[in-house]
Structures are given as C-alpha cells and as structure tokens.
Image: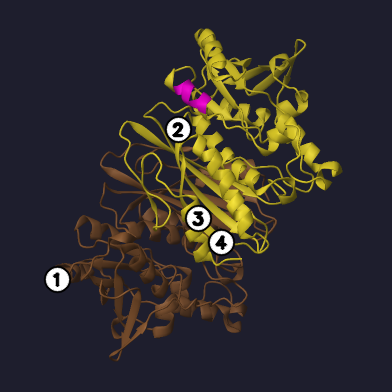
Chain colours: A brown, B yellow
C-alpha cells in the first residue's frame, strides 16, 4: 500500500480539473470557491460508517463511492440547491488497498460529474476500526428560495417522488444469507435502490426554479419520521392517504423504511397541473399522498377510511446494526 | 444513553443562535449561508480519529471538542480566511455518553465562539470502532487574496509564527507511562501545545488585510514536510537557517514534529518592519527563519555554516499509531 503523500498525489490526479466556481481544489490548506452573488450557499454532510450504514462485502468500492455522494446530494436536492463542490473525509482500515480507493473515487466522481460537482478537498486517515466516509456537499440556491422543512402551509398538498420502501426491502435482501454469499454486483431492483439511490437533484432544482413547492425534505429517515419533521417545523398537521403511497414493496417499508432518497414536498393546490407537467418532463413519478392540515396535530395515515396516528416505527432493519440517525 | 433524535434536539439547543451570515443552521437537510459578494469561500476539513490522532484517556471531552475545531481553523488561518460556519461529523462508540457529548460541544463552541463561527450542521452516527470527528470549516477571504502554497517567490523571506516542536514534545510526554496514569487536565506547556493548539486565525487575517504575505501553509505535517509543499507548489527552493528556528524543545522536533498549528509564510524583504509591527500588535512572535531561492531545488537547512538537505524525516512519533497524513 502506498504512503499517504503518494495517495494524496494520486487523489489530485483522480480529482483533477476545476469545476464550476472552483478557484482552487485539492492541494492547499483549503479549497477556494468564487462568490455567487444572488445565491445562498447550502452545505450538508453525511456519514457512512462500516457496520452501521453498510457492510463492505455487500457492495463494490465504486458503489460505496457512488452512495457516499448520493446521500449528500440528496440533502442538497431537498433544499432545491445545485451542487458545486465536495469534500470527502475518509477513514481507511489497513486492509483497504489503493485499488479499492481508486475504485471508490471512480464511483464518487462518476456521480458527482453528472451534476457538475467537483471533489475539492477533504482528509484521509487510517482507521483502527472500520471504513468510514464523511461526505460534505456544497451547493447554491437562489437567495431566499431554498426549500425548507418549516415552510409547509395549511391546505397544501403533500407529494413524494418515485417509489418508497424499496431501499428497506433491498436491505432485507442484503441481510439475508443468500446475498451474503453472492458477490457484489449481482442485484435486483430493490437492492439497487438501497445501494445506488438516485438523488433527486433535478426535481429539487425545478421545484425552486418553477416556484412549485414551499417545504421539502428527503426521506432518509423514512416517511413516518420525515413527515413528522416537516409537521413539527411548520407547526401544521399532515394527513397521509395510505392508498396513494407508492409502495411496490408493501406499505410497511414504504412508511417506515429509512435510507430512501426520494423527496417529500408540499405545494399549493393550484400547482397540481404544473407538477403533472414537471413529472412528465423529468420522467419521475410525483405522487400526491396527502395534505397539510392545521386542524390536526402531528402525522396521521388514512387507510380504507380509517385514520390512525403515523408514528415513527423505528424500522430497525439492521438487527445488530443501528438505525441511521438523522443528520442534525 | 438518549436516542439519536433526542441527541439532535439537544445539539440544536447547544448550537442555538445564528452566526454571522448564517440564514439557517442546525435542523434542516442543509445549512444556508447568505452570499458574500467580493469574498471567496474557503472550505476545509480535518479528521481526528481515536487511536490515530488522539487517545481518549489523554484529554477531556472539552479538549477534544476544542482541538477538533482548532485543527480546521488552522487551515482557514493558513488561507487568510475568517471562519463563519462549522459542520461536525461524529462517529460515537457505545461507551460515549451524553455527558461526554455535551462536554465535547462545550469545548467546540467555546473556541468557535471566539472567532464568531457557528456550528450549523453535520451528522451523527454510532461507530463500532473508535470515536472519530470530521471537522469542516467554512470561511471567507477577500476575493483573489487567499494565501496559497503556490505563491512563494524567489528572494522572499520565510517566516514561522510562535514556537515549533512543542506539540511533538507534548505528545512524547503523553505517550510516556507517567501521563497515561494521570488524569486528563494535568499538563505542562508542551502537552498543552499538543492538546489545545492555538489556531493563528488573527495572524492569517492580518497578513491578508495588510498585504504582507504571498504564500502560507500551516505546519500540521511538520516544518520539513510543509516547507517542501510550498517549495514544490511554488517551484522555488527554500533555505532554512537552523539557528533561527524557534525550537524550545530542540531542533529535531521543531523541524520534523507534526501537528503544530503555527503558520509558515513568505513575505517580500521590504515587509520586515511591517511584520515586526504586526508581531507586537497581535502579541505573537514571528521568526524569520529563511528565504525562498530559485537557484536551489527543494528544501535545505543551514546549521553552523553547513548546508544539508531538509528532507521530511517522517517523525513517526506514534509507534503503533500512524502519522497524521496531510489533508488533501
């Protein structure tokens, strides 16, 4: 295994090239980004910890690199921001070799490149425990127009993008013995939803640019937890229509499964046609699953005419592994 | 131990209040910073990994929080930037309790507050291995005026702030059996230099605002490594006068000891008087230790009239623990 300075030189090569707005990338004490008058800066970070968020034998190093970027891109998407710069903090156990690291960066830069985001820095360390990644994303959104959790208003529709629960279902498959014994790279669509989630950056941007949504959040903690975050932050109740939730793997994982990187957002009733148009244009289903209602407190779900509280069920899918905590 | 959501609520309380330029802090998918026209954004991150960069019994949780912020502030200082926002990624072993976490944040916010920087986000995770922290700092510097490694010019003086080698000497004391058996909190000045380094933010800012320096770097990898970074990036040789190096713990740790958060910078010869004035005004020794010289390649040291190559000695002070790698 090469030394740290050689690794850094190698990283400079892998991350060469200046992205949009990047004055100075990898190689100094800090990265430099030029000013963007008229835009707020959005910054978010996400940890992926071996044994907590992933197991190494589940996935290829490329997939781990991809996912590290995807989870933070999803946070930016939920704010309606366009990504620009990435910092990666990596803790590397002794058995991670240079080929692994190169493949990890290939996966990371492949996804980042699709959104014109550049790796501009970070830190490398050995790790006496498992592998971990801290993925930090910087982006920009038109000043004052970020989608925030505290902007849901009484009477608005509640939407989710894509389908829910597939990531949790994929995780169950990964945890099963069959897949443990298979090699990384052989997956069905549920496993793919878990390992290679698609961040909804384009949706977030279009919601801002077209002025279609007021509040948004990504569903990394699961619908039942994240809907509550919006309800609490916005001081409004949310009532979900269970039959409208897009749940190909069943309602339970759709409501409570975490690590799904779809967006939940609220929109005025008058925006329904415009959202249908947007859905077609970007090729992404947008399901109207409920409404914001200030006459109730907290989150509720209606299935076949019966209304029940929608409490976070702590879908503790990992057994020995702990549930992914919310970013704070 | 409280659950993750309770911890986040507690963090919101600990990090409450909006800092300078912070539109939205802890509590959404991302933090929002308002635009600063005329200023470049500087961003840097540093890992502190248990068993690599620290041992928990060496230091109080407050000191760990302090140091996590100090190391990243030092990167901003080396760019001449004023800090504004902080994200902390924390991997927490099961034996880290809420009291530890609260104390950690007390230490972090105490140092951050001195520089009007605010914790605006991050991520929390359990960690099956040791404790780790990824400290991400965002700051601002007047557009185009950041101090960069690649800006040293032939004939310039080379300066360092403070004294060198004390952190490495402190680390040796911590590694010795006496201190292992003592409780955290009882230290002499060398140990303090290692555990609670003072980031040179004010120096970096004044060098930019007064136009006194062109290149700068912090000495987190040690003088012999970091002088070489400047020499390589700037395509100029550097000759150090060994007798001028401020080395209260001896020349060896001063040249090769890492984790010292002083700045090395280069300045035109005509700035000597202005730098002496600055040194007095901010109460920080600035030692002129050498010069940039394009007639030589790489770094050299002169002691008692004899010139030798100054190669990074890989001052591998940790024994079983690996040397801190450069940020990349």
| Residue receiving disc 3 | B11
* C-alpha distance separating marks 3 and 4: 14 Å
- Residue A302 visible from this viewpoint: yes
Is B186 above or below relative to A171?
above
Q: Chain of mark 1?
A: A
- List the residue tagged with mark 1: A273
Quarter of the image for residue B225 reads top right
- The residues bearing labels 3 and 1 have C-alpha atoms spaced at a distance of 41 Å
Nearest to viewer (mark 3 / mark 4):
3
Confirm whether the magenta stretch covers residue B104: no
Mark 2 and mark 3, same subunit?
yes
Secondary structure of the residue carrying tag 2 is strand
Q: Mark 3 packing: few (<14 Cα in 10 Å), some, or many (20+)?
A: some
x 34%, y 43%: residue: A20
Residue B279 in the image, given as x and y percentages of width and height: 56, 16
Instruction: Check if mark 1 and mark 2 are on a common chain.
Output: no
**Residue behind mark 4:** B125
User: Between marks 1 and 2, how big is the CA–CA gap?
Assistant: 47 Å
Determine whether, in the image, residue B4 is placed left or right of residue A3: left
Q: Position of residue B223 (x, y in %)?
A: 66, 28
Q: What is the number of the mark on residue B82?
A: 2
Q: Nearer the viewer, residue B212 or A182?
A: B212
Q: Chain of mark 4?
A: B
Please identify the quarter of the rendering in which residue A154 is found: bottom left
SS of the residue under disc 3:
helix
Q: Residues within 10 Å of mark 2 (few under 14, many from 20)?
A: many
Seen as rendered, the residue at the extreme bottom is A304
Q: Is residue B306 above or below residue B324?
A: above
């Amino acid at each position: 295994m090469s030394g740290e300075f050689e690794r850094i030189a190698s990283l400079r090569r892998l991350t060469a090239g200046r992205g949009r707005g990047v004055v100075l990338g990898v190689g100094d004490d800090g990265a430099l980004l030029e000013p963007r008058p008229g835009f707020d800066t959005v910054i978010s970070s996400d940890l992926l910890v071996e044994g907590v968020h992933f197991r190494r034998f589940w996935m290829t190093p490329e997939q781990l690199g991809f996912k590290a970027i995807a989870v933070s891109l999803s946070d930016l998407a939920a704010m309606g921001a366009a990504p620009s710069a990435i910092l990666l903090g990596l803790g590397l156990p002794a058995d991670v070799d240079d080929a692994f690291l190169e493949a990890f960066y290939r996966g990371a830069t492949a996804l980042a490149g699709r959104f014109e985001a550049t790796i501009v820095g970070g830190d490398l360390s050995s790790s006496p425990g498992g592998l971990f990644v801290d993925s930090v994303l910087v982006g920009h959104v038109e000043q004052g127009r970020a989608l925030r959790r505290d902007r849901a208003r009484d009477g608005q529709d509640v939407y989710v993008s894509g389908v829910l629960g597939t990531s949790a279902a994929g995780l169950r498959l990964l945890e099963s013995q069959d897949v443990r014994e298979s090699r990384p790279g052989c997956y069905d669509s549920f496993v793919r939803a878990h390992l290679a989630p698609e961040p909804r950056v384009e949706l977030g941007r279009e919601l801002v640019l077209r002025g279609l949504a007021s509040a948004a959040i990504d569903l990394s903690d699961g619908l039942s937890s994240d809907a509550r975050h919006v309800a609490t932050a916005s001081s409004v109740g949310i009532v979900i229509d269970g039959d409208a939730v897009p749940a190909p793997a069943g309602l339970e994982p759709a409501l409570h499964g975490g690590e799904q990187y779809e967006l939940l957002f609220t929109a005025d009733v008058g925006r329904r046609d415009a959202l249908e148009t947007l859905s077609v244009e970007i090729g992404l289903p947008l399901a109207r699953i409920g409404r914001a209602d200030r006459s109730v407190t907290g989150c509720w779900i209606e299935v076949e005419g019966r209304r029940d509280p929608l409490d976070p069920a702590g879908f503790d899918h990992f057994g020995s592994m702990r549930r992914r905590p919310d970013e704070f």
